[in-house]
Amino acid sequence: MNDVANFGAILRRALRDPETIDVFRGILEPMMEDQTKKLKKEIRSIKVEVEQVKQKTDDLEKRVGELEIENKDLSQTIQHQQKFLESLDYDQRKHNMIMMGLGETEPIITEDEVELTTDAGKINHILRKIGQNDIGISSIQRLGKERNNLGRPRPIKITLKCSSQRKEILQAARNLHGEAAPLSRIFIKKDTHPDISREYKRLRDVERKEKEKPENQGREIKYDHSTRSVKIDNMIIDTFRPAFL
């Protein structure tokens, strides 16, 4: 204990000695100067790295912005292609309509007790029943493989000579629901590409499911045909997804 106290006293006297102070200064100043240089060098290196990171970040943000623009342009291009292909498909199908539910072997008995057994005879009778006379038909074709009598009848594709008559037929076909069987089971619709039909059905299913959700009670939920989208309180939640390519 005395040795420690003596050493402390000697050290304090030495530190008050100008020559000792000069010695310490001569030792410490070069060390401090060297450490300062190293620190400044490290700071400069860090600054360079920070600038590099900042530059990379700026470049990345710029590229992200470019990709967003490219993605938007690509999306618009796909939409234009979609509509173009749909227009081509529509032009090919605009003379066609599909009749569902017409029995293949089941005859239709007219008011005059005439038995109609051919698809052509049945179709002309159905058209007359809904007030559509003098309809020019180019062709009649059952779609799909032939089935046994136990299965549902295959749909029929009817190609009209004049496409303008299709709209009137489709509107008048609603009256078939008021007829007696088997005419009441008949349904007539446009000939639409399967991919487009599936997408419309998907959007209708989305609309139905949203309406069934408890949290959506009191909200306006509808399918907007003009924009081909499902909206909740006028906000789009789902849109037609291009698949017909």
Image (cartoon, rainbow, N blue to C red):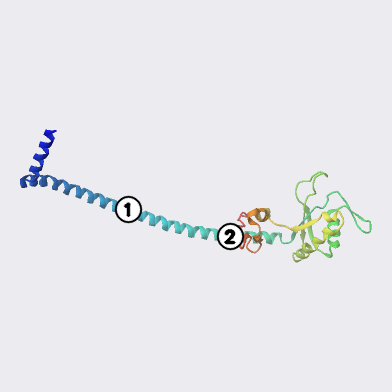
Q: Which residue carries the number 1 mark?
A: 50
Which residue is painted at 53% across and 58% down in the image? 74
Which amino acid lies under the numbered mark 2 shown in the image of this protein? Answer: Gln
The outermost residue toward the front is 2
Q: Position of residue 43 (x, y in %)?
A: 26, 51
Question: Label 2 near label 1: C-beta < 8 Å?
Answer: no
Q: Earlier in the sequence, mark 1 or mark 2?
A: 1
Which amino acid lies under the numbered mark 1 shown in the image of this protein? Answer: Val
Residue 161 in view of the camera: no
Residue 16 in view of the camera: yes
Judge depth for marks 1 and 2 and give the one in front: 1
Element on which disc 1 rests:
helix
Which residue is painted at 14% across and 33% down in the image? 1
Residue 149, picture quadrant: top right
Which residue is painted at 45% across and 56% down in the image? 64
Image check: 52 left or right of 188? Answer: left
Q: Position of residue 162 (x, y in %)?
A: 76, 65
| Mark 1 neighbour class, 10 Å CA radius: few under 14, some 14 to 19, many 20 or more | few
